[in-house]
Amino acid sequence: MTPQLGNHLIDEGVITKAQLSEALERQKSYGQRLGDNLVALGHLSAEQMAGFLKKAPVAPKNTDESGLDPLFIADLALKHALFMGEFGMQEMAGKICLPVSAVEEALDFLRREKLVEVTGAAQITKASFRFKITALGKNRAGDLLNLCAYCGPAPVPLEDYCATVEFQNVRNILLDEQSLRSSLEHLTLPEEVYHQLGPAISSGRPIFLYGPPGNGKTAIAVAISEALPGSVYIPHSVLVGGQIISVFDTVNHVPVADGIGQAGLDRRWVEIRRPVMMTGGELTLKMLDLQFNPMTKTYEAPLQMKANNGILVIDDFGRQQVDPQDLLNRWIVCLERNLDFLTLHTGMKFTIPFNQIVVFSTNLEPKSLVDEAFLRRIRYKIKVDHPTEEAFARIFQRVCAENGLEYSEEVFLDLMDNFYASHDIRPSACQPRDLVAHIVDYCRYHNKVPRFSRQAVAQAWKDYFLQ
């Protein structure tokens, strides 16, 4: 848990100072995190703890609470006005995701500057005024778009972003064994892997998955995301040194529908499932830095920033376009201090939290990729090996059931004796899926009912393996 958690709980009236002291004393004897000890002592329930760690950003009441300069808000409103035609205060507030009071202040300024004008009103109240942009306003909006083409929800200040990421710290998650097993039930894994994965995920520390190809390392990395409880809040964009960095990614971030329209929420933030960012052989060092778009004059957040409070999977580690040692040099401080350093094209440097479970997955020998300094910073190293014959049989049973084939133990034993043993090939967890897929494809083409038979297996083997 973060050191400030206890103070946050006291400030919110969730626990007392005496209860915090009792939990800290218990932590000295039993270890674990502060939240675990508070739950164990009965000072709050696991549900209360999880709910506290998912505190929604509160909507600002005015311009000052938004953390943004009034002129910045006015410029953003003017850019929106260029595309809105006639509009009211509520409509503009919906576009820039700020309270009406902040919008009213911005529109008053734009009216004084003759950049927008009032076209009418349903009542004699300012709230019912209808506005449209003037010719002077259109020229000004065009100039603003040339400087920065961003025209979306108002960004949040860097300080607010960092504070929220720290509050939603991935190391604060309360993971139970049942959730982990449920997320991995579609895989056939040895008990040893479960015993290693549980503490590794719960710790929020980097994980190194290694072993021969085709045995589920990538599938495990993806399934871990299903085990992470709860949701988190991320901003549409962040304002740093007058520059806008887009964070919310419609491709990789999955919004939680329940959070839409909830009263009191700061609409500049989006409630999403814990993010899962995955990269493989295409990874370059450039992808770990801010991506400046010279056309829009805005930045795209790097992978690790989009993955904050979630999971970042480096698949096929060692096969990237970037040398593993270079990646080590780029992230050695990040993994050690949980901070990352980014630079704007203006030269301004700033820090952001590096708060995600980094999962490295490789089928290469770990010691041939990186040195001991890097491996030391990856606390959990889990080998995902070839399945035993018993586990291999269970995988075949599950795959046959999923494809509507009747499993035959006699055919399986024949496969093991006359194919795997005779060709000196070790079974891999992906092979049942692939061989059964070959059977289904072959039978569909020949207009036959797919069967898990000796003949079908022999044909699938011939098509699948190199002779």
Image (spheres, rainbow, N blue to C red):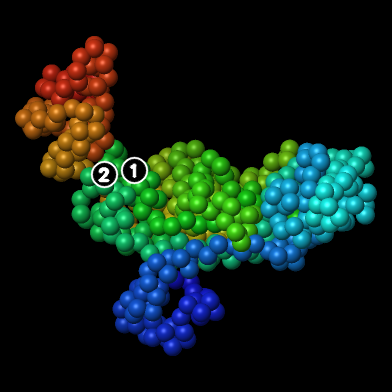
Q: Position of residue 355 (x, y in %)?
A: 50, 60
Q: Residues within 10 Å of mark 1 (few under 14, many from 20)?
A: few
Tell me if residue 297 can be seen. Answer: no
Q: Which mark is residue 197?
A: none
Write down the residue under mark 1: 219
User: What's the residue type where badge 2 is placed?
Assistant: Leu
Residue 62 visible in this rendered orientation of the protein = yes
* In front of the other: 207 or 4: 4
Mark 2 and mark 1 lie on one chain; the one further toward the N terminus is 2
Spot the residue most to the left: 410
The percent coordinates of residue 215 (x first, y second) are 27, 41
Q: What quarter of the picture does the N terminus occupy? A: bottom left
Q: Quadrant of residue 165?
A: bottom right
Question: Is 419 rendered above or below residue 358?
Answer: above
**On the rendered structure, is 12 left or right of 145?**
left
- Please tell me which residue is depicted at 49% across the width and 63% down the height of the picture: 54
| Left or right: 347, with 320 as reference point | right
Distance in Å between CA atoms under marks 2 and 1 = 8 Å
Q: Which mark is residue 187?
A: 2
Is there a contact, CB below 8 Å, between mark 2 and mark 1? yes
Vertical order, 304 against 465 (above or below)? below
Instruction: Identify the residue shown where x is 36% and y is 59%.
Output: 201
Q: Residue furthest bottom?
A: 18
Label 2's element?
loop
Q: For the view shown, which residue lies furthest in the front direction?
A: 123
Viewer-side residue, 235 vs 224: 235
Q: Amino acid at mark 1?
A: Ala
